[in-house]
């Protein structure tokens, strides 16, 4: 299973970036292989608009079905949700902690029922 985390780190030793569309990149963690791959998101860092949607499309193209981030906007949420990607937000700082929380079932999935409270 592949889990995507928003970050600037190419390893699990880094920190979670709380932004989704404008995160420096995405760490794709393969739970079966216990391996990491970094995908650059530089094209969206300074995008005038559409950064979340483009980032969502990039996530979908990796084949990952889980995303851990701090905040995912409504447009990106809809794109990801329609592709079957489950989205989790967290206040955790380290990527390792995010994976531990995910594995122990302690992350809350953002879904249609609670998305409005996520966006504030």
Image (cartoon, rainbow, N blue to C red):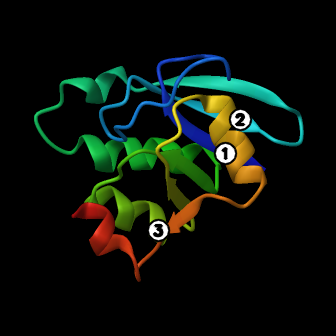
Residue 88 seen in the current view: yes
25 on left or right of 62: left
Q: Which residue is drawn at 68% across and 23% down?
A: 12
Q: Residue at x 82, y 42 (%)?
A: 31
Residue designated by label 2: 29
Chain-order first, disc 1 or disc 3 = 1
Residue designated by label 3: 81
Q: Which residue is drawn at 66% across and 59% down?
A: 106
Q: Is mark 1 on a helix, strand or loop?
A: strand
- Residue 49 lies, with reference to residue 7, above or below; the image says below
Pick whichever, 25 or 61, lies toward us: 25
116 on left or right of 23: left
Pick whichever, 80 or 13, lies toward us: 13
The circle drawn on residue 60 is none
Residue designated by label 1: 3
**Badge 3: residue crowd in 10 Å (few <14, some 14–19, many ≥20):** some
- Residue 23 position, x and y percent, is 37, 30
Q: What element carries label 2?
A: strand
Q: Is mark 3 on a helix, strand or loop?
A: helix
Chain-order first, disc 2 or disc 1 = 1
- Residue 19 position, x and y percent, is 34, 38
Q: Which residue is drawn at 64% across and 49% down?
A: 64
Q: Quadrant of residue 75?
A: bottom left
């Amino acid at each position: 299973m592949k889990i995507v985390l928003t970050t600037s780190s190419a390893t699990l030793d880094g920190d979670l970036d709380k932004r989704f569309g404008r995160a420096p990149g995405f760490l794709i963690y393969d739970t079966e292989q216990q391996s990491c791959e970094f995908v650059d998101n530089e094209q969206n860092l300074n995008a005038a608009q559409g950064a979340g949607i483009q980032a969502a499309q990039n996530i979908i193209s990796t084949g990952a079905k889980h995303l851990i981030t701090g905040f995912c906007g409504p447009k990106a949420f809809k794109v990801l949700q329609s592709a079957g990607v489950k989205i989790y937000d967290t206040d955790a700082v380290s990527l390792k902690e995010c994976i531990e929380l995910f594995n122990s079932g302690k992350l809350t999935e953002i879904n249609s029922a609670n998305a409005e409270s996520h966006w504030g």
